[in-house]
C-alpha cells in the first residue's frame, strides 16, 4: 500500500508545504514553516471546525498553539488550548474553566473528586492547577508525524486525532466542571 493510499484511508490531507507570515512589533515580518503536527492541527481547525487559522507558531517553528473559547451557559467560559510540539512529537489539549476555585472546597474533597473522576475518563485526566481544575489529554506520536521534519514527505497524522480529543473534551469537561461547582457551592 502506498503512502498516498494510506493518507486517503485515514483522511489525511496531501502534503502541501505551508508557511505562515508573522509581523513583529518593529514592523518586520517572519516567514515560518508549518511543520507536520501543526499542519494537522491547522487542517482540523480550518477544515473540520471551519474556524479561521488563529494558530500561533513559535519563532523556531517547533511549537504551535491554538486557543478556543466556548461557553455552555452565560456564567461559565472554557478556554481550550491545543499545543503541538514538533521535536518531542507530542500533541496536548488543555481545558480550563473560569468558575472553579478549589480553595473554596476542603482539599480532601478536591483530591477525592479528582481521583474518582479520573477513574472513568476514556482519555485524559483532571488535574488541580493554580486553584482550579483543568482537563488534560495528550498524544505521543513519535515516529508517526513525518520522517521528513522539513515536510517534504508523507505524514500519518490525521486531523481526526485532534477532532477526537476536542469532541471528548468539549462534551465531558463541562459536566465534570458542573459537578465540581455543585461540590464548591
Image (tube, rainbow, N blue to C red):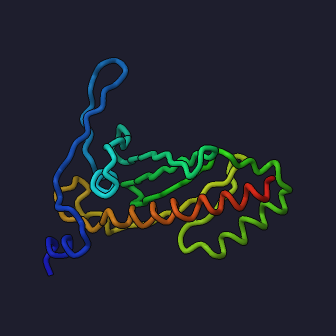
Residue drawn at (16%, 54%) of the image: 16
Q: Position of residue 84 (x, y in %)?
A: 40, 53
Residue drawn at (82%, 49%) of the image: 104
Residue drawn at (17%, 50%) of the image: 17
Farthest bottom residue?
Answer: 1
Q: Let me know if residue 41 appears in the view.
A: no
Image vertical order of residue 15 relative to residue 33, above or below: below
Image vertical order of residue 23 relative to residue 55, above or below: above
Q: Position of residue 52 (x, y in %)?
A: 32, 43
Residue drawn at (84%, 62%) of the image: 108
Q: Let me know if residue 53 appears in the view.
A: yes
- Residue 173 vs residue 21, the one in the foreground: 173
Farthest top residue?
Answer: 26
Q: What count of labels does the image hold?
A: 0
Q: Position of residue 51 (x, y in %)?
A: 34, 47
- Residue 136 vs residue 58, the one in the foreground: 136
Q: Is residue 31 left or right of residue 166?
A: left
Amino acid at each position: 500500500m502506498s503512502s498516498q493510499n494510506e493518507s486517503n484511508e485515514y483522511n489525511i490531507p496531501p502534503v502541501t508545504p505551508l508557511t505562515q507570515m508573522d509581523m513583529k512589533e518593529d514592523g518586520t515580518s517572519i516567514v515560518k514553516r508549518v511543520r507536520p503536527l501543526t499542519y494537522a492541527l491547522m487542517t482540523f481547525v480550518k477544515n473540520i471546525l471551519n474556524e479561521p487559522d488563529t494558530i500561533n507558531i513559535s519563532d523556531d517553528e517547533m511549537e504551535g498553539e491554538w486557543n478556543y473559547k466556548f461557553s455552555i451557559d452565560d456564567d461559565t467560559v472554557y478556554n481550550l488550548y491545543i499545543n503541538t510540539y514538533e521535536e518531542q512529537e507530542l500533541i496536548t489539549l488543555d481545558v480550563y474553566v473560569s468558575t472553579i476555585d478549589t480553595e473554596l472546597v476542603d482539599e480532601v474533597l478536591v483530591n477525592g473528586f479528582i481521583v474518582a473522576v479520573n477513574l472513568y475518563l476514556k482519555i485524559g485526566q483532571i488535574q488541580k492547577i493554580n486553584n482550579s481544575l483543568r482537563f488534560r489529554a495528550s498524544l505521543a506520536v513519535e515516529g508517526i508525524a513525518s520522517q521528513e521534519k522539513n515536510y517534504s514527505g508523507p505524514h500519518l497524522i490525521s486531523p481526526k486525532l485532534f477532532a477526537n480529543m476536542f469532541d471528548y473534551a468539549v462534551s465531558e469537561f463541562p459536566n465534570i466542571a458542573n459537578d465540581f461547582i455543585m461540590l464548591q457551592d
